[in-house]
Amino acid sequence: MKNILKLSMTATLFLLIVSCKPTFDAAQVLQSDENRKELYKNIVSDPVKFSEFLEIANNDKNASMLMMKDHMKMMEDGKMMGMMKENPEMKGKMEKMMQEKMENNPEMQKKMQEKMRKKMMEDPAEREAMMEKMHNRMKENPEMMEKMMEKMMTMMHENPEMMEMMKKKMKDHQLDMEKQ
């Protein structure tokens, strides 16, 4: 009987200890700067965890917009161009990802177009570089060229000022070609 009593007391104590595991509260853990920084380091240092984190962030609209704002800031600061010059594969992936994001998010597309328009109007050299890049892309991709032409035609029909500006540019270009 003593053995049964000892065994049941031991089993009860063991079950009590096993069932009293600590509960995890993410909000509580993240309140401490030290814990938060350690968690960030852990995620960033592990490529699998970091990829999971980015996937979760990309699926959240607010997080995705924050990442896009940060990305735009890096682009404006020139940091992104430096990284892409060192890694052409990254540049291709980034351009593809940006294109997909803009196709899926009209709000982002509108903001990007507005920023590009503003940049082009402020700096003639920037405008020329962007136009050259666009022309090269259109030569490489006839489907893109077709879409751009359709969009330009629509815009010109909606905006008579733009139509007149394009006509003038075409005449000027034709005159320049005749002189050569």
Image: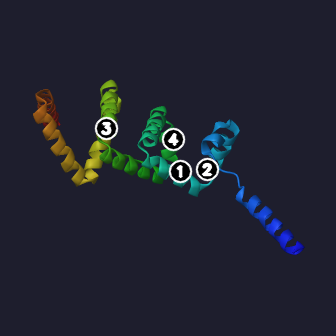
Q: Quadrant of the C terminus?
A: top left
> From the viewer's perspective, is 126 left or right of 52?
left
> From the viewer's perspective, is 161 left or right of 17?
left
The numbered mark, 3 or 1, whose residue comes first in the sequence reads 1
Q: Secondary structure at mark 4?
A: helix
Residue occupying the point 48% across, 50% down: 56
Q: Is residue 98 above or below residue 46?
A: above
Q: Secondary structure at mark 3?
A: helix
Residue at the spot of label 4:
82
**Residue 37 falls in image quadrant:** top right
Viewer-closest of 24 and 49: 24
Q: Secondary structure at mark 1?
A: helix
Mark 4 closeness class: few <14, some 14–19, many ≥20 residues within 10 Å = few
Q: Amino acid at mark 4?
A: Gly
Q: Is residue 115 above or below residue 136?
A: above
Residue at the spot of label 2:
43
Q: Give the Cα separation between the discs numbered 3 and 4.
A: 27 Å
Labelled pair 2, 1 in contact (Cβ < 8 Å): yes
Viewer-closest of 167 and 156: 156
Q: Give the Cα separation between the discs numbered 2 and 4.
A: 25 Å
The mark lying in front, picked from 1 and 4, is 1
Residue at the spot of label 1:
53
Labelled pair 2, 4 in contact (Cβ < 8 Å): no
Labelled pair 2, 3 in contact (Cβ < 8 Å): no
The mark lying in front, picked from 3 and 4, is 3
> From the viewer's perspective, is 131 left or right of 164?
right
Residue lying furthest top: 122
Residue 141 at x, y percent in the picture: 26, 53
Q: Give the Cα separation between the discs numbered 2 and 3.
A: 30 Å
> From the viewer's perspective, is 96 left or right of 67?
left
Q: Give the Cα separation between the discs numbered 3 and 1.
A: 24 Å
Labelled pair 3, 4 in contact (Cβ < 8 Å): no
